[in-house]
Image (cartoon, rainbow, N blue to C red):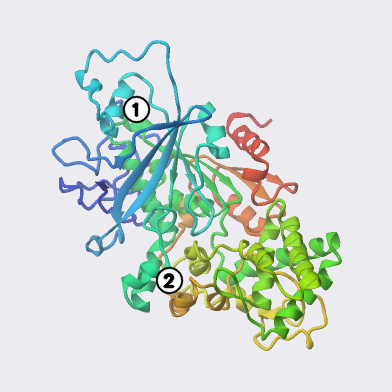
Amino acid sequence: MMQIPPHPSPPPPPPPTQPHGNGNGNGNGNGNGNGNGNGNGNGNGSDSDSDSGSDCGSDSGSSASFPQHSKDHVVPGQCKVTAFFFEVPLDYENPSAGSIQLYARRVAKNERPLFPPDDDDDDDDDDDDAHNDAHAHAHAHARGSIKPYMVYLEGGPGFGHRSPSDHPVTRAALPRGYQVLFIDYRGTGLSTPVSAAMLAQVGDADAQARYLRLMRQDNSVRDCEAVRRCLTAAWPSRKAAWSLFGQSYGGFVSLSYLCMHPEGLREVFLTGGLAPVGKTPDQVYDATFRKTAERNQQYFAKFPQDARVLRDVAAYIESRGGRIPLPAGGFLTVARLLTMGIAFGGHGGFDNVHDTLAALETSLRQFGFLTRASLASLESFTPFDTNIIYAILHEAIYCDGPGNASNWAAERVGRARAPGPFSWLHPDFSLAQSPGPLYFSGEMIFPFHFETYPELIPLRQVAEKLAAYTDWPALYDQDRLRNNSVPLYAASYVEDMYVDYRLARETSTLVKGSKVFETNVMYHNAVRAKADEVMQQLFSLRDDELD
């Protein structure tokens, strides 16, 4: 297990300096990760080939202490996978608060050269435990075989990574000479994952809220930068910066990274991730409700019969007291039924919702009740029970700096649109009093989620505290973005229901030097659903010339 020292975020606008560690891996510093970089934001540092310094080691120049990791294993597709666990501070501003673990997996092309590298100059290369990254990377550099990192940042918040070996970013990056690092954000995946049971051990609701406030994108940036400085500690400084690929919320993290540690970045790729910089939660949800209403209109134009089916299923729920127990716990209510529209933002989302409604309607028609299979299908739409950060911090990712409380922005904005198809958001809603059409909600979190999901029910008080919290740290520095010098290439989707296209365009205009591929024939999950097209367009932005 490797312990990475804390490095508080630098005050903008001056670039961060590099204080020294204390020699035991606990030093206080905000280092730029390249030892002698010039802080100009392009991630290239100086032209020196000398190995960079490391906050993972000591002031005396002893070798850095690197994380424990698994023995490399090879998977189909000529991919070599290595798993890591890092230890980082829970609170970078208060190192005494303890530490958490980060989990990451590195994917590299498995190369079997006809003639192995000449290692006669170093007998240590024959050691059976030559899995120390400082050792391996130093000798890789001596052989001229260092491959730059591309770090994939997952959407969310609240989700770890799926298998990296067959990921579209892996397939695109390895042939282009990268190795790819997949880091589970703090609190997700295997990175000290947050759950209701885990939070109960933290303390009361106030303690749990304090813990969760440390799970946003600003601290994910600090985690990533600490990992970068560690993994590239033995690399020449001009090669130590890495590339980011941010999908959706991963783009939010990437933009925060550009503001906090641009010196650690060589280039940034975003897909559906141009965050609404400078916008309040209310402004964000006003925009996303408009797009969600459009998607509802398109859905019911495709499946007009589902307007009746939806009301029939809702009427059945009302006839059973408004709460039907679900197979995995929690309850189906009319409001929860109407949150299935979260799927409308992706390729295939309409069909998924239609198929689920068809299963519910068929169950009622054939048996007079909702079968376990039909209810289980509905449960799969929103995995909040296994990814509670997505629910409990969703509005917090839009709270950029002090004075920005979310106060259940989605619910307030939705209720303000009544009377109308979102009138079900009002607590006194009934079908009898609302004869008009019903619309599904989109990517929104409401207080009733904390009454209908078993893992969220114990966290209702914590959710209320987070919704009322006003002293959030800043997530973005608009001056730094206006003066950005890190190349940024983005795919932005006109029909994106999750990241509003108009707000995304404002952000791309704000970020100096950004290049954007805009399209109205792809949805938010195009990086998976139409991976080849997206990758071709993104790398063309970088590699091709515009007349």
Quarter of the image that includes the C terminus: top right
* Circle 2: residue type: Pro
Residue 47, image quadrant: top left
Q: Would you name the residue on which mark 1 appears? A: 47
Disc 1 marks a residue whose amino acid type is Asp
Inspect this view and state whether residue 395 appears: yes
Name the residue beneath numbered marker 2.
Answer: 402
Q: Position of residue 311 (x, y in %)?
A: 79, 76
Contact between marks 1 and 2 (CB within 8 A): the answer is no
Q: In this rendering, is residue 380 above or below 533?
A: below
Q: Is residue 31 above or below residue 422?
A: above
> In the displayed structure, does residue 414 sit left or right of residue 270?
right
- Place residue 212 in its image quadrant: bottom left
Q: Secondary structure at mark 1?
A: loop
The mark nearer the N terminus, 1 or 2, is 1
Measured from the top left, where is residue 218 in percent x and y?
Answer: 41, 58
Residue 33 makes an appearance in the image: no
Q: Nearer the viewer, residue 25 or 391?
A: 391
Give the side of residue 24 with respect to residue 170, left or right. Answer: left
Where does the image place residue 229, in percent across and percent down from the top left? Answer: 32, 41
